[in-house]
Image (cartoon, rainbow, N blue to C red):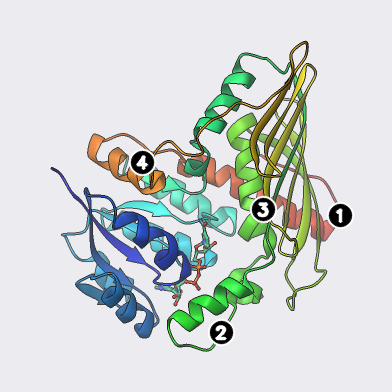
């Protein structure tokens, strides 16, 4: 059996709570090394997950020729530089969301990936929507069963990153230091952290965005960054959409509503994975499983490497999401509608 040998950059919350627990259950995955600027985190993560090598400089890790693929799981503004270095070192890459914090960086990734078409580059979170529920919805849209889609609302929210960051700090015996609230280290607030899901869901279902108007505000969190936002999208296909996200909501939501001339679809509204209203049929609640397979995100990446196919979430799609994120920040600061070119 072919194994894919992985190195992970960033040994923090998402690596310890998501990447490593999933990878450890996949036979075709071998974790060769982990790298983190913070030595304590690199060392303790390696110990906890029985990873033989750890580094404080990810560039040294990238020199290893027994690593096929790299997962980039560091704070948002660092994703582009690490991804470009990994591609130049001939590694496949999975990039945590958001792919980048500005279009200059996301375009660097697109260009670097295009120079190396045999490498697989998977931009999160698109693969999260590769589920029976989203397949069902995509099929309804393709069949035109809810008619012309005229409006979409996508909301992604939780109570804020601080509780989670406290848990991460305590896991390493460190004092909490919430980079998510620091403009220099995060470059954007809830919109970059959570709005990326709302926008990616809309793009996944409806395609490209034509223009953007954004409202951002800070209502509760101790940060100069946005903790609540609404981003209005004029879609190329004609629909109007709102991509909202918040760090100050309980319980959190992860919902999408699509309104068409002949029906309505609610995804993940009040614990119901899917509700569909079809003209003449009324409300349907299809019973579908939530995921295609356990550990789908990592299994998909690994299968694509083994089978030599490009994964879901291309650099171009990720770049488009970053275009929308950047346009939303620009719109909010200028009070104007920003066209996506
Ligand atoms: N997909 C998801 O569900 C999900 C959930 C949480 C976070 N994330 C994303 O994952 C990324 C990391 O978030 P987190 O919550 O794990 O943060 P974290 O602070 O818990 O971990 C990030 C780690 O990266 C390290 N780091 C920073 N710069 C580095 C560099 N240049 N080289 C090596 N290591 C470096 C830090 O020391 C830290 O240990 C973010 O972009 C975030 O948006 C995704």
Nearer the N terminus, badge 2 or badge 4? 2
Q: Quadrant of the N terminus?
A: top left
- Label 2, residues with CA under 10 Å away: few <14, some 14-19, many ≥20: some
Q: CB of mark 3 within 8 Å of CB of mark 4?
A: no
**In the rendering, which numbered label is found on residue 335?**
1
- The answer to which quarter of the image holds residue 320 is top right
Nearer the N terminus, badge 1 or badge 3? 3
How far apart, in angstroms, are the residues tagged by discs 1 and 4?
Answer: 41 Å
In this view, 236 is above or below 306 = above
Q: CB of mark 1 within 8 Å of CB of mark 3?
A: no
Q: Residue at x 33, y 44 (%)?
A: 299
- Label 3, residues with CA under 10 Å away: few <14, some 14-19, many ≥20: many
Q: Residue at x 71, y 44 (%)?
A: 270
Residue tagged 3: 195
Query: Would residue 96 appear left or right of 331 to someone viewing this image?
Result: left
Q: Residue at x 74, y 16 (%)?
A: 147
Residue tagged 4: 300
């Amino acid at each position: 059996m072919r194994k894919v040998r992985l190195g992970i950059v960033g040994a923090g919350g998402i690596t310890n709570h998501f990447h490593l627990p999933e990878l450890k259950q996949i036979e075709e995955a071998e974790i060769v090394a982990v790298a983190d600027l913070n030595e304590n985190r690199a060392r303790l993560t390696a110990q906890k997950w029985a990873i033989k090598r750890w580094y404080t400089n990810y560039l040294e890790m990238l020199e290893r020729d027994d690593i096929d693929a790299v997962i980039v799981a560091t704070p948002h503004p660092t994703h582009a530089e690490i991804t470009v270095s990994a591609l130049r070192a001939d590694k496949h890459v999975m990039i945590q969301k958001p792919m980048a914090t500005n279009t200059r960086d996301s375009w660097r990734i697109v260009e670097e990936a295009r120079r190396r078409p045999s490498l697989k580059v998977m931009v999160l979170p698109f693969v999260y929507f590769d589920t029976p529920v989203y397949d069902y919805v995509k099929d309804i849209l393709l069949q035109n069963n809810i008619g012309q889609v005229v409006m979409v609302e996508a909301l992604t929210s939780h109570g804020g990153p601080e509780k989670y960051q406290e848990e991460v700090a305590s896991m390493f015996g460190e004092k909490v230091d919430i980079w998510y609230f620091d403009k220099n280290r995060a470059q954007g607030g809830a919109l970059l952290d959570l709005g990326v899901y709302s926008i990616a869901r809309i793009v996944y279902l409806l395609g490209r965005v034509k223009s953007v108007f954004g409202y951002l505000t800070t209502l509760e969190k101790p940060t100069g960054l946005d903790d609540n936002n609404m981003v209005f999208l004029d879609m190329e296909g004609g629909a109007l959409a709102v991509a909202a996200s918040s760090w100050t909501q309980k319980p959190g939501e992860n919902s999408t509503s699509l309104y068409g001339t002949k029906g309505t679809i609610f995804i993940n509204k009040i614990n119901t994975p899917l509700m569909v209203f079809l003209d003449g049929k009324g409300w349907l609640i299809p019973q579908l499983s939530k995921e295609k397979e356990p550990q789908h995100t990592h299994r998909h990446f690994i299968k694509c490497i083994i089978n030599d196919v490009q994964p879901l979430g291309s650099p171009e799609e990720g770049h488009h999401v970053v275009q929308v994120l950047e346009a939303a920040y620009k719109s909010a600061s200028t009070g104007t509608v920003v066209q996506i070119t």
